[in-house]
Amino acid sequence: MTQPTLTGPHAGHAPSGQGARTRRVWTNVGIVVATVGSAALAAGAADMRLYDSAPGQPAGNLTLSAFLVSVAAAVMLCFRLRSPRALLVTALVACLPPLVLPTDSLPALIGAASVVVWHPDVRARWGVPVLAGVATIVAVWRDTRGTASGKSFWNSFEHPDGSAGTWPAMPWWQVLLVAGLLVALFVGTALLRRSRADTDVHRHRAEAARAEADDLGRRIAEQNDREALAREVHDVLGHRLSILAMQANALEIEAQAAGAPEVEDRARQIQQGAAGSMNDLRSLLSILRHGPQAGERPYELADIATLVTECIDAGTPVSSNVFVDQSKPLDPVVSRSAYRITTELLTNARKHSPGNLVRLSIHGNPRDGLVISTETPMAPGGSGTGSQSGLAGIGRRANDLGGQFWAGPSDDGRTYTATARLPWHLPR
């Protein structure tokens, strides 16, 4: 009889979890057992009242039908928490038997209490208890028409000794009093439980609001830190790049006047590199201040051809071999990281093996991932690397993506190879 959680606007009130399911099972068992006992007492009194039968004799058809209908209503109530509609339907059905059959109103009261606790519609929370109250009044009035021992459950409270003879029927005001007390007991308990559930919901919402406010404050503090860092970077690097561009421009003018075309080309390349670095700096600062969407289009794997051209123009010979099967799209994060890793590998090769040919190899597919490799000649007696801080940065970037990186001299000591292997898709 395990019930799923009630859905709807007040679904947060409905219990969930293993402990709640266990409580619902035992609650349903208690409903069925209590209803069977109460219906049996009501059927016995009604049988004596209607058929004047003695205890132990077979029950009449009407009273037996009333008993079975009450038990069926109790079983239906076990499925009341499936949805708001199921809750309303089962509660309304439980209110009908006492109106037409000689049975008690316990299922109607249980259904009304459940509606008060769990149903999201205010009209249902008022209407069903009123209908259950009417059913209780009818059931109590019908029972108190029994004026002899064994024929009335409620009259037996006024004659606990089972005195013989005819009892006076319970007056109407006592009928209303008994029915009102029963309805007040069930509905009052339900209102108390709903009040506690509402309190829990409001507490959870307040905690969620506080957590959201704390998160917002943290993000504002991080934004302020990014703003301060962006200003610092702009002031320092922007100033130095501007000076570098000015000096390159002056050198270009002097070389042009002196008739040194090679020096003039070198100065122009330095000036263009400084200008490109300034653009990159502005883009990075915009991202740092306002998020990734605010900056210019980030470099990706498709921009590596331009990168190789820039390296060749700067005087570094590069032999590139690029083959990438993009039958399935490459993850954008991996694509951007591949560009940055290639940039670092070429910079590292140009720094530690200046003037020598750099062999760049990039190949990949959705199944095997992406492999980026550079190979440069090693000077006699050299290690091919300096402090290895650049290689360490490449390794960290590759590891962050779930890839691998290794670098080192060949077996014959003639070349130095650095290779990064990246996944095609990042794990989700």
Image (tube, helix red, strand yellow):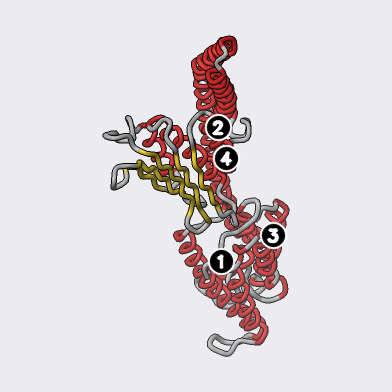
Q: Amino acid at mark 1?
A: Glu
Q: Residue at x 62, y 83 (%)?
A: 64
User: Residue 329, percent across and down?
Assistant: 59, 52
| Frontmost residue, 207 versus 352 | 352
Q: Could you tell me if the residues under marks 4 and 1 are in contact, i.e. CB atoms within 8 Å?
A: no
Q: Secondary structure at mark 1?
A: helix
Considering only order in the chain, which callout, 4 or 2, is on the residue closer to the N terminus? 4
**Inter-mark Cα distance, 2 to 1:** 106 Å
**Inter-mark Cα distance, 2 to 3:** 80 Å
Q: Mark number for residue 128?
A: 3
CA neighbours of label 3 inside 10 A, class few (<14), some (14 to 19), many (20+)? many
Q: Residue at x 60, y 53 (%)?
A: 11
Q: Amino acid at mark 3?
A: Val
Q: Is residue 8 left or right of residue 16?
A: right
Q: Is residue 18 left or right of residue 250?
A: left
Q: Secondary structure at mark 2?
A: helix
Q: Amino acid at mark 2?
A: Glu
- Which residue corresponds to mark 1? 158
